[in-house]
Image: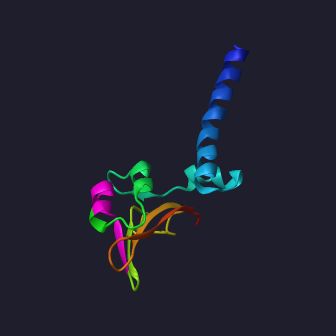
Amino acid sequence: MERAIAAVIVIVLLALCIPVTRNMTRYGMPATHAMCVPIMDCTSWAPGYSEEAFLSIGIGTSTGEVQEVLGPPLYTNALSNGLSWHYTTGPNGKPLSSSCGSTHVRAIHFFTNMTVSGKTYEFYFD
């Protein structure tokens, strides 16, 4: 019986370590922050979003190609030097929401010629 309880405890601890390790690697954050990500996460994700598809988008990709791969963004932000498409939002429907807690940030940024200039891939702690 004691071995069974010990085995369950080990399994639970390992299950808790996997997301912490993943977040440490994904965001380059210390373990103390990475442990908070699952607890504080208030992210809304675009329908059909996938990390693999997001990571496949490169500099110079057109808006049409991005939309073909990722689908429509949840939020669009027009800037003086281009445009940002956000594939994640907080509970208020906007990026970097502070109304609930912290959010994953996934955004594609475009030059004025509507080709990808960069991406944001981070976790915003609030």
- State yes or no: residue 76 in magenta: yes
Total marks shown come to 0
Query: Which image quadrant for residue 9?
Result: top right
Q: Give the percent coordinates (x, y) of residue 79.
A: 39, 82
| Residue 27 appears left or right of 95 | right
Q: Give the percent coordinates (x, y) of residue 47.
A: 32, 53
Q: Is residue 93 visible?
A: no
Q: Is residue 25 visible?
A: yes
Q: Which residue corresponds to the image point at 34% horizontal and 72% vertical from the top-left?
A: 76
Quarter of the image that includes the N terminus: top right
Q: Which residue corresponds to the image point at 68% horizontal and 28% vertical from the top-left?
A: 10
Color theme of the render: rainbow
| Residue 122 appears left or right of 64 | right
Magenta-colored span:
65-78
Residue at far bottom of view: 80
Q: Give the percent coordinates (x, y) of residue 39.
A: 57, 51
Query: Which image quadrant for residue 21?
Result: top right
Residue at far top of view: 1
Residue at far front of view: 60
Quarter of the image that includes the C terminus: bottom right
Q: Which residue corresponds to the image point at 56% horizontal and 50% vertical from the top-left?
A: 38
Q: As displayed, is residue 70 above or below residue 16?
A: below
Q: As displayed, is residue 125 above or below residue 47?
A: below
- State yes or no: residue 88 in magenta: no
Closer-to-camera residue (114/105): 114
Closer-to-camera residue (76/98): 76
Q: As displayed, is residue 24 above or below residue 114?
A: above
